[in-house]
C-alpha cells in the first residue's frame, strides 16, 4: 500500500498499486496446437545458464529450436539493429559467427560492458513460420558473464 499526505491542505489518501498489464501471445508448439502465453513487462525470455555470451548464430538457432514455429525477424539492442531479415546476407553471415558482445560493440562502439555487468537486454521481433504473423514477446535476457 502507498500513502500520500499533503500538509498544505488537509488531505490524506491511501492506495494500492494495480497489477501490471498483461499481453497475450499465441505461440506455436511442437504438437500442432497453439499455446497461449500471458506475460507482463516484468517478464523476460531467459536463456539457459550454460549459454553464456553465445554467437549470434547459436542464439538464433537456440531460439528457433526452443520456440519451434517461430522465426526471428529482427534482434536489437537499444536503438541498434543487430540482425534483421532484410540485412545483407554477407553481414548476416559475418555477425552470426561473432559473439553477441562483439556484435553489439561493432555496431555501436559507444556501448561498453562493465566487469560487473552480467546481463544484456535484447528486443526480439519474431513471427510464425506458417503464416508470417508477428508474435509479441518480452525482452530477451542474455547472460554475458
Image (cartoon, helix red, strand yellow):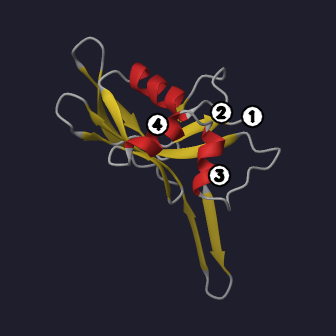
Q: Is residue 76 left or right of 143 when viewed as pictured?
A: left
Q: Which residue is mark 1?
A: 145
Horizontal side of 68 relative to 92 (left or right) equals: left
Of badges 3 and 2, nearer the viewer stands 3
Of the numbered discs 3 and 2, the one sitting upstream in the chain is 2
Residue 5 at x, y = what percent?
A: 65, 74
**Residue under circle 4?**
93
Q: Quadrant of residue 133?
A: top left
* Precedes in sequence: disc 1 or disc 4: 4
> Residue 75: percent from the left, percent from the top?
45, 45
Residue 48 lies, with reference to residue 60, above or below; the image says above
CA–CA distance in space, label 3 to label 2: 13 Å
| Circle 4 Cα neighbour tier, 10 Å, few/some/many (<14 / 14–19 / ≥20) | few
Q: CA distance from mark 2 to mark 1?
A: 7 Å
At mark 3, the secondary structure is helix
Would you name the residue on which mark 2 appears?
A: 53
Amino acid at each position: 500500500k502507498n500513502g500520500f499526505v499533503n500538509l498544505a491542505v488537509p488531505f490524506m489518501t491511501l492506495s494500492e498499486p494495480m497489477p501490471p498489464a498483461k499481453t497475450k501471445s499465441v505461440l506455436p508448439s511442437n504438437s500442432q496446437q497453439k499455446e497461449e502465453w500471458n506475460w507482463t513487462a516484468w517478464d523476460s525470455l531467459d536463456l539457459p545458464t550454460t549459454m553464456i555470451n553465445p554467437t549470434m548464430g547459436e542464439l538464433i538457432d537456440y531460439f528457433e529450436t526452443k520456440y519451434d514455429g517461430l522465426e526471428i525477424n529482427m534482434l536489437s539492442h537499444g536503438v541498434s539493429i543487430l540482425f534483421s531479415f532484410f540485412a545483407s546476407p554477407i553481414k548476416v553471415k559475418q555477425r552470426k559467427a561473432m559473439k553477441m558482445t562483439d556484435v553489439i560493440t561493432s555496431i555501436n562502439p559507444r556501448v561498453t560492458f562493465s566487469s560487473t555487468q552480467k546481463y544484456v537486454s535484447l528486443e526480439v521481433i519474431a513471427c510464425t513460420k506458417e503464416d508470417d504473423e508477428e508474435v509479441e514477446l518480452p525482452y530477451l535476457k542474455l547472460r554475458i558473464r
